[in-house]
Image (cartoon, rainbow, N blue to C red):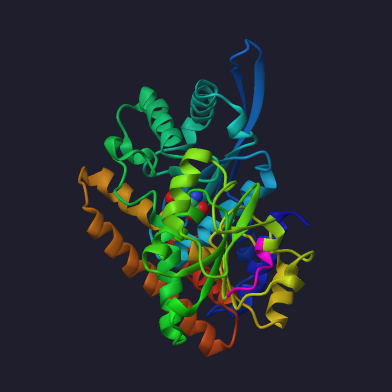
Amino acid sequence: MNPYDEINIKLLEASSHISNKVSDGTLEMLTKPWREIVVSCPIKMDDGNTKVFTGYRIQHNAVRGPYKGGVRYHPDADQNEVKALSSLMTWKNALVNIPFGGAKGGIQVSASELSKSELRNLTRRYTLSIDKFLGPNTDIPAPDLGTNSQTMAWMMDSYGSIHGYTPAIVTGKPVELGGSEGRDSATGRGVVFIIDEICKKLSLDPHKQDFAIQGFGQVGKWIANIAYQKKYNIVAVSDVKGGIYNKNGIDITELIKHYEIEKTFQNFKNVEFITNNELLTTKCDFLIPAAIERVINNTNADNINSKFVIEAANHPVTPDAEKILESKNISVLPDTLVNSGGVIVSYFEWIQNLYQHHWEIERVNSELQKIITKAFHEVFDKSEKENINYRLSALSIGLDRVIHTANLRGYI
Ligand code: GLU
């Protein structure tokens, strides 16, 4: 099964928990992307050869506002993966109630194998190829796996070369170009806000919990950093090459310094070295997949040894794995809620750009906390009231909002 079918399975299940019955036609309208753009992006490589990369921008649904979602540079970013991720953006943005539809972009490329100038040329070609379908009131890209603030600066510059200075065309830009304070840490900060709310709600002392984080990139590193500043016990972390473990907790401040220089965990002191799969099956209270999708699947779900799975990545748990986790009484906090901090602060960035204004970091973080905490309580309350899991609760809240707006606009 491809990831897009997997997301639709979850959605169809959630559709039986919405306030009013919907027709099959309406469900089809909500599950099918509205527009799928596929482009060929030829660039001249540093060695003089021309190479053609395939790029996508999938615009899933714009009932609630302009399309919004990141752009991923990854070898696995094929059309079905980008479609799945575009759908998740629709439900994420609706759940946290920000005025955006959902979209996702991608280029099938291993970004680490390209030089800076090759990446810049590829980004420019991709942006110019999809330019007609972008705009601050049409579709606003952002970073995702394999892209960063530099990529957004290039996208903004390419779009601006045709339309003039338009900072609101992308979010996740460098602060010097109109980016928001706190955007780089926003997804990780949001994840920690969610963990704090779970602990409050279930009367758990977060200082007595063990945390294991898969992924030490833009999201995982910030989760580790912020949780460590709060003195939470992080027993394991990993990157693509493998992980490290210490039952008594890893010194994350030292680890970040080490990782910045060495780009690997190798030779870090006072830890045991483990594989990525060992990280996923580590005994802990909170397991936080913060890397790529489908890492918890039917090959390892039986061995997951945590009380909670916190989906900081998009779609890290397959539907069949989720059933296994459920039978083991492991609660899954879904991606559309857990990792929404990034797009919430993207929303603040877009507002700041439209008003040509700059918010202080304190304002960004406190508004983020307000929005994500409210969404958490909505998900938690509906799940308690209807005795359904958190994912069905989150997706059905999103579905209800999108259907309501589609009705108001006369689509259905
Ligand atoms: N790529 C991020 C996500 O999956 C952020 C999207 C955005 O800021 O538009 O939520």
Question: What is the quadrant of residue 31 in the picture?
Answer: bottom right
Q: Classify residue 91 as left or right of residue 353.
A: right
Could you tell me residue 271's position as x and y percent? 58, 59
Write the residue at 53% across / 51% down: 216
Magenta includes 280? yes
From what the image shows, is residue 384 above or below residue 101? below
Could you tell me residue 233's position as x and y percent? 48, 70
Magenta includes 377? no
Task: Name the residue at the front extreme.
Answer: 270
- Magenta stretch bounds: 279-284
Check the picture and name the quadrant holding the C terminus. Answer: bottom right
Q: Nearer the viewer, residue 147 or 352?
A: 147
Residue 131 appears in view: yes
Write the residue at 79% across / 64% down: 299
Write the residue at 47% across / 39% down: 261
Question: What is the quadrant of residue 76 in the picture?
Answer: top right
